[in-house]
Amino acid sequence: MKAQACKPCAEGTYSLGTGIRFDEWDEVPHGFANVATNLEVDDGFGNAVENCTASTWVPLGDYVASNTDECTATLMYAVNLKQSGTVSFEYIYPDSSIVFEFFVQNDQCQPTVEESRWMRTTEKGWEFHSVELSRGNNVLYWRTTAFSVWSKVPKPVLTQLMFKWAEPKICTEELPQAAKLPPSGVKTKCPPCNPGFAKSNGSTCQPCPYGSYSNGSGCLSCPAGTEPALGLEYKWWNVLPPNMETTVLSGINFEYKGMAGWEVAGDYIYTAAGASDNDFMILTLVVPGFSPPSPVLEDAESKEVARITFVFETVCSVSCELYFMVGINSRTNTPVETWTGPKGKQSYTYVVEKNATMSFTWAFQRTPYHEAGRRYTSDVAKLYSVNVTNVLGGVASFCRRCAPEPAGSCAPCPPGNAMDRGSGTCRPCPPGTYLRGHPSDGTPTCHPCGPGTRSNQLRSLCYNNCSFSLALPGRILHYDFSALATGTAFASGPSFTAKGLKYFHHFNISLCGNQGRKMASCTDNVTDARLPAGEGDPARVVTSYVCQSILVPPDVMGYKTAVSSQPVSLADRVVGVTTGSTLDGITSPPEHFPPGHPDLPDIVFFYRSNDVTQPCSGGRATAIRLRCDPLRPGTGSLAVPSKCPEGTCDGCTFHFLWVTGEGCPRCSAGHYRPIVGACLGGIQRTTYVWREPRLCRGGQSLPAQKVRGCRSVDFWLKVGISAGTCAAVLLAALAAYFWKKNQKLEYKYSKLVMNAAAKESELPAPDSCAIMEGEDAEDDLVFATKKSLFGKIKSLTSKRTPDGFDSVPLKTSSGSTAMEL
């Protein structure tokens, strides 16, 4: 202290440095608080103890022992650290009838991130436990509560305690401003067992036998006609499950450290402080295999064997990262999802598609940069629950319906059959419906197939057979996409660089298929490209309707062929095919792409994927617009939205525009028109041509040219002239006939007029109005001098005189002068 420097101890002496040790327990050391409180809860085992004054931790020389009654005994110690430090102690905890907790709180009674609440029972004598302490005020709590069963007296908890200050020590613990901490916090009961487990006589949680289920309180037999749905569900974390292990991986030299990376805390498990801020805190769950309720079909859209769902949360002040990795048959874990920065409490689901020994690993890193000291110990990741379905040899939290067999056992319904709740037997799904996959819970039911798809009654799935009919006003269009159903690879979107390397988004797409379809696949051949021949598993392959990978051009890495990595499924189940923009909650906005032909709408294929991602709790979705363009034969071209170069604008729904001649409807009679030629030499030809623009492919071919006999124009001209001449002659004859007849009528009229005039002049009246025999000659004399045609018309149309009589000029046969009457 005089030189204000650290010096080694003299030979034969030792020092704890900046730490303090408590190893003599003749009495409770100064600074410790030892209190006991009443549980105040009747737990069914007896009346609550009224007086708990003597139920405290008892010092017994080399150790201190807890109480063994139903009171809550708490041993507390407060310390103020100028730098982060460590608390370590040894303990014996042989009896699970006592709830033993150790946790750390700050001066505001808030538990710190390093709390390790529920201690594990010891099996081999004294065990060592260490917890990191953060800078500032820390209150250490050792709390026990016993539950006596009948006449059994629980064995007490024994602890030996040692503190160690962070070196070098530049402070003193005798500060006048040291805060005084309040007493212990709220009392808690021992948590129940996890679902599928129940407490045994020794108060430890044991799995329920097959044929029964449990919600954590007790095992119950499955009712008749049901079977247990095997799985694993962890939501209470008083001890680490036996099939889970934790460790710490150094972020500097990538070596495993002999310390726990995750600590249990009752209703969650969280990451410990670690030795460095860039260490990886590792937690691994190993599952030996799976037992799906029915065999997974090879040609099914969903090859789900099981699924794992977990609820997590990250509290970070910098760019921390939480990795979720999956390993198959003890091989290297492959990251499937990464979360960066603070994330609120949320759920994530991963679908298992291979029945093998699987390992699920959570790795948390506070910062990728190595710095001296630990600055981000308050950054943590928490797991609240983990649920794995269809676990081989697992336990059941519920029972599902099944079809009973004659021997009394229970079997699931075969593919394509659903359970009839009334009769308890399996019945096939009606036409147009299918049995949806392998649900994680509940009873499978029949669901209708989407538009443009049909059901396979033997395989329990909906598929598209690459044909589609569209009814438009006045016509029906038939499509056939079989040429595009075998899977086609595209490199799409702008390239991007990372560390000087150029990459492309690589999409493989298969529109539709039937029982013999070949789906698209994306391969991860980066890892195997670096392994010697004969080592390692084959490259990871993702097979689905649409998959995506990162493509590295061959001229970048120096390989002969391009390599790809990070394959992921974007669409593994067809929903339907329609010309609309929305189907089953999936929307394909037309404004994402340039407009197409106004008379021919796009055919939109809608898909879903069972792969659940961080922003997409319900899985991904994909919409492919197939547009007709006869000028682009073969596979044509693939485009993504200009505003979303990676194919997706929200990370959940992917949009593609596939323009190709194979996307045109099949040709029919409405796609061509006839052209009739002139009649030459008595022959006329009819030729058929396509309507422009031609918007069809295949189907009906153009009809052959038609030839038929015809008459030339000269023949019809002669016929017309002859007919016209005959008509003119006939009209002339009719005119002459009517003219002659009209002349006789004119004479009769004139005679009547003359007789009327004679009567007025007292002339003798005519004997008769008719022409008498012999009068024709006289008529000829009278009208020898005939009027012209104009004169006759004028005389017939002359006006009457004012006295009402007509004025008729007459000529006498003797040539005397005319007179008017």
Image (cartoon, rainbow, N blue to C red):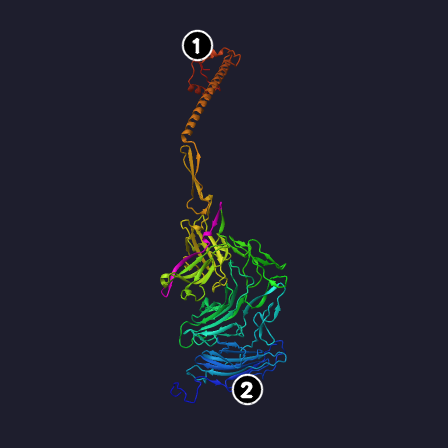
Which residue lies at the image location 43% right of the left edge and 89% below the top edge?
13
Dividing the picture into quadrants, the one containing residue 152 is bottom right
For marks 2 and 1 on the same chain, the one whose residue lies earlier in the sequence: 2
| Closer-to-camera residue (808/169) | 169
What predominant SS class does the magenta segment belong to? strand
- Residue 457 lies in the magenta-colored region: no
Residue 769, how many percent across, how many down? 52, 14
Whether residue 81 is situated above or below residue 644 in the rendered picture:
below
Q: Secondary structure at mark 1?
A: loop
Q: Secondary structure at mark 2?
A: loop
Type of residue at label 1?
Ser
Residue 224, how many percent across, how many down? 63, 64
Circle 1 residues within 10 Å: few <14, some 14–19, many ≥20: few
Q: Image check: 191 left or right of 723?
A: right
- Residue 814, numbered circle: 1
Which residue lies at the image location 53% right of the left edge and 57% below the top edge?
461
Dividing the picture into quadrants, the one containing residue 676 is top left
Circle 2 residues within 10 Å: few <14, some 14–19, many ≥20: some
Tell me how far mark 2 sits from mark 1, CA to CA: 186 Å
Type of residue at label 2?
Leu
